[in-house]
Image (tube, helix red, strand yellow):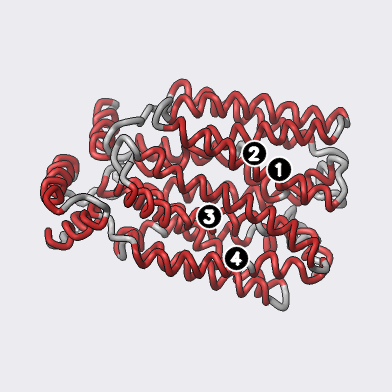
């Protein structure tokens, strides 16, 4: 693997670090904000709480917006410029959330950060997949997931340490504000990465500009022209001169695949566990300080098994990892439900939660961003990525919005014992396993252009 492409991919993937940090850092602020601003009340006669909508899920609705419309700047402005503005959004969100005087302005800045998260889940995987080869695409694109996981771990550690250093009434502000530092560093670093040669060609830039971009990726000048012609031939072979849009009917196969992998990703309950980890562990019998510390173990296991997933994704393939992850999901979620139902020891329950996290890291966690970024043809890839990530974040937002209604110890439907929540997720993972067995194609080792042709051919054959 070329070291320069690795470094460039890693820089783009740092958007994932901010993604992971931003989405999980709220777990440490969840309980303090609920108490300080008294946000834990129902909105009228609805089943939704103010806390669920404005504090916990507002960033996710921003993420929905960023992912659904992130394909527009990714396609028109380019992958690089979009990644730069994502860094700006992260920085503004971190500083604004930390300084917010009341819940409404807090929600606005969390929403802004969510837009950055959603857009990054479109732009970064697309960029990385386009600058890598068929042989390294899985590992390089999966670095985005690794950085998400690394960001999650650092957020858990940061929350724990800040919780020790500062009084609870102000600690949550530092938890949120500290993100501004890595956001600023990332925004500066992204200046140095080149534009995607594939994007430059699709936007009809001059050959000299494309060759310059190719050489910045580490390809020697005497080979850059050959590489340019190879991309041109591949693009001409797979890009028709029509005005077909994503929903013209031609791309139904990848649309369904992207929707289902994103749907099942969230119906595993992964964001439910990550966002509410301290509260779930407290319900299992751990004290507040112990639950924050135990949350770090979730981040550590996530990181370790993400390494495993990344190392295997180009060897075993995407489908095999999904088999492993699905079976792990089913067993661990069923046992977490049983632990809550039977009142089992909190250490045993934490062990099964960690198995759940490991199953996610090896399976869905390693696969989802790679898979969505490679199943759409070049001409609609950024919009296809928006479709898949948009689906992911809509369900993430809904689950986070509804969680207080079911989980909260005072007003939740399952306030006495949340075991039915985990059994529901386990049943969803049985459905995911069936989808993997009967519908999911293997994409390992196939070029982006060949994948576009393959899925289009399948679509045409099905008519």
Q: CA distance from mark 2 to mark 1?
A: 6 Å
- Mark 4 near mark 1, Cβ–Cβ under 8 Å? no
For marks 4 and 2 on the same chain, the one whose residue lies earlier in the sequence:
4
x, y percent for residue 429? 60, 29
Residue 301, numbered label: 2
Q: Which comes sooner in the sequence, label 4 or label 1?
A: 4
**Taking 439 as reference, is 293 left or right?**
right
* Position above or below: 119 against 462: below
Q: Is residue 240 something one can see in this rendering? A: no
Question: Which of the two labelled residues, at mark 4 and mark 3, occupies the earlier sequence position?
Answer: 3
Residue denoted by label 4: 179
Instruction: Find out whether the residues at labels 4 and 3 contact each other: C-beta distance under 8 Å.
Output: no
Residue drawn at x 34%, y 65% as measured from the top left: 192
Q: Residues within 10 Å of mark 2 (few under 14, many from 20)?
A: many
Marker disc for residue 17: 3
Q: Secondary structure at mark 3?
A: helix
* Distance (Cα) linking label 4 and label 2: 22 Å
Q: CA distance from mark 4 to mark 1?
A: 21 Å
Which residue is label 1 attached to?
297
Verify CB contact (< 8 Å) between mark 3 and mark 2: no
Q: Are marks 2 and 1 in contact (CB under 8 Å)?
A: yes
């Amino acid at each position: 693997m070329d070291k320069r492409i690795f470094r460039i991919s890693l820089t783009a993937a740092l958007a994932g670090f901010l993604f992971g940090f931003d989405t999980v850092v709220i777990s440490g602020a969840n309980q303090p904000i609920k108490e300080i601003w008294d946000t834990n009340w129902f909105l009228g006669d609805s089943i939704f709480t103010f806390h669920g909508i404005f504090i916990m899920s507002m960033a996710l609705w921003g993420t929905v917006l960023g992912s659904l419309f992130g394909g527009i700047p990714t396609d028109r402005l380019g992958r690089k410029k979009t990644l730069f503005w994502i860094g700006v959004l992260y920085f503004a969100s971190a500083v604004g959330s930390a300084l917010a005087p009341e819940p409404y302005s807090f929600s606005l800045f969390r929403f802004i950060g969510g837009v950055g998260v959603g857009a990054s889940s479109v732009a970064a995987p697309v960029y990385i997949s386009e600058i890598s080869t068929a042989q390294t695409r899985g590992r390089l694109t999966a670095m985005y997931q690794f950085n998400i996981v690394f960001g999650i771990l650092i957020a858990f550690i940061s929350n724990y340490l800040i919780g020790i250093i500062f009084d609870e009434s102000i600690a949550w502000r530092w938890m949120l504000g500290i993100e501004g530092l890595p956001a600023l560093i990332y925004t500066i670093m992204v200046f140095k990465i080149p534009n995607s040669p594939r994007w430059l060609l699709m936007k009809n830039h001059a050959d000299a500009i494309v060759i310059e971009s190719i050489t910045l990726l580490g390809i020697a000048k005497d080979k850059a022209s050959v590489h340019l012609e190879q991309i041109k031939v591949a693009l001409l072979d797979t890009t028709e001169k029509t005005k077909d849009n994503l929903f013209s009917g031609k791309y139904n196969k990848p649309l369904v695949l992207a929707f289902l992998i994103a749907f099942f990703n969230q119906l595993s309950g992964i964001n439910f566990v990550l966002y509410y980890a301290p509260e779930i562990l407290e319900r299992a019998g751990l004290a507040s300080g112990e639950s924050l510390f135990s949350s770090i173990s979730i981040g550590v296991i996530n990181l370790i098994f993400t390494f495993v997933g990344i190392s295997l994704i180009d060897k075993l393939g995407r489908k095999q990892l999904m088999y492993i992850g699905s079976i792990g999901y089913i067993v661990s979620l069923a046992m977490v439900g049983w632990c809550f139902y039977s009142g089992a020891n909190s250490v045993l329950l934490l062990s099964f939660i960690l198995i759940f996290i490991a199953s996610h890291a090896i399976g869905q966690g390693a696969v989802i961003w790679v898979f969505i970024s490679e199943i759409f043809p070049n001409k609609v890839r950024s919009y296809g990525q928006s479709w898949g990530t948009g689906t992911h974040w809509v369900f993430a937002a809904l689950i986070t919005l509804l969680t207080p209604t079911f989980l909260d110890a005072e007003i939740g439907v399952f306030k006495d014992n949340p075991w039915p929540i985990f059994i529901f997720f386990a049943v969803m993972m049985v459905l995911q396993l069936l989808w993997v067995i009967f519908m999911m194609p293997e994409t390992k080792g196939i070029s982006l252009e060949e994948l576009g042709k393959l899925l289009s051919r399948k679509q045409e054959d099905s008519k």
